[in-house]
Image (cartoon, rainbow, N blue to C red):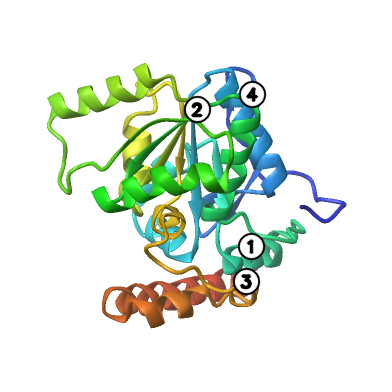
Amino acid sequence: MLAEPLKPPITTGPERKGRRWPRKVDLLGVQVSVTNYEEATDMVIEAARQREPALVACQAVHAVVTASCDPDLRDKLNGFDLVTPDGQPVRWAMNLLHGVGLVDRVYGPELMLHLCRSAADNAVSVYLYGGSPEVIELLRERLPRLCPGLRIAGAESPPFRALSSTEDQATVERINTSGAGLLFLGLGCPKQDLFAHAHRESIRAVQVCVGAAFDFHAGVKPMAPAWMQRRGLEWLFRLAHEPRRLWKRYLVTNTIFLAKLFHVGFLR
């Protein structure tokens, strides 16, 4: 939900086949969409219903900093149709720098559920790509219970390595022949973003990069309590559960984010 009134666009969203996506604002060089759950869900599902390929990413602090420090990744991500403010600090920064009036973030795991429920209502099937074999099987079992009526057209756990050209072509063929209108990618950042961009012309579905949503909805990792999410403390919750894997990510990227944000704010 957006607070009204909104200021005039700072940048505009890309258009594909006449579809106008939500406007974007610049955050450390990354173009992030000014949107909410309702608008994002409606636009993605309508594109999926019309079988219009599109690219969607959900960007928290780690993803924004990673892209801001990598010009090639940043350029690719800025070509996405929809880039949602996944983390509360991202939303706060957008409000601070651009006064866009966002009253909530658009969190990847939550957006995935919104999309799956709307997909069930609109007879749009989905394809799941990513995660371990255990995660993908659990997700395939649990997701229809969370979203009654959802049709999963396919689900697979890719190998933990680069695909050969033959494997890649076969993957694209499986996804396209499944008839899925939505392709959820749970490959982690930035691997899922690079996959989506590389297949922007070959995959005939809306590709939605949702990262850890696969693990959360499969029930193999806990999600932060709502009160921690509202206060931007999800990173602390995840760090407490996976300190060895995540300490460097949060120590480095959170510090860089704050430093860059301070620098931008000071220059203004």
Residue drawn at (13%, 24%), measured in percent from left and top?
Answer: 166
Q: Which sits in the foreground, 150 or 101?
A: 150
- Label 3, on which residue? 226
Q: Quadrant of residue 16?
A: top right
Q: CA distance from mark 1 to mark 4?
A: 25 Å
Helix, strand or loop status at disc 1: helix
Q: Which sits in the foreground, 163 or 220?
A: 220
- Label 2, on which residue? 125
x, y percentage for residue 226? 62, 71
**Within-10-Å neighbours for mark 1: few <14, some 14–19, many 20+:** many
Give the mark, 1 or 4, whose residue is nearer the N terminus: 4
Task: State yes or no: discs 1 and 3 in contact (Cβ < 8 Å).
Answer: no
Q: Where, quadrant-wise, is the C terminus in this rendering?
A: bottom right
- Label 1, on which residue? 91
Comparing marks 2 and 1, which lies closer to the viewer? 2
Describe residue 161's horizontal placement relative to residue 127 as left or right. Answer: left
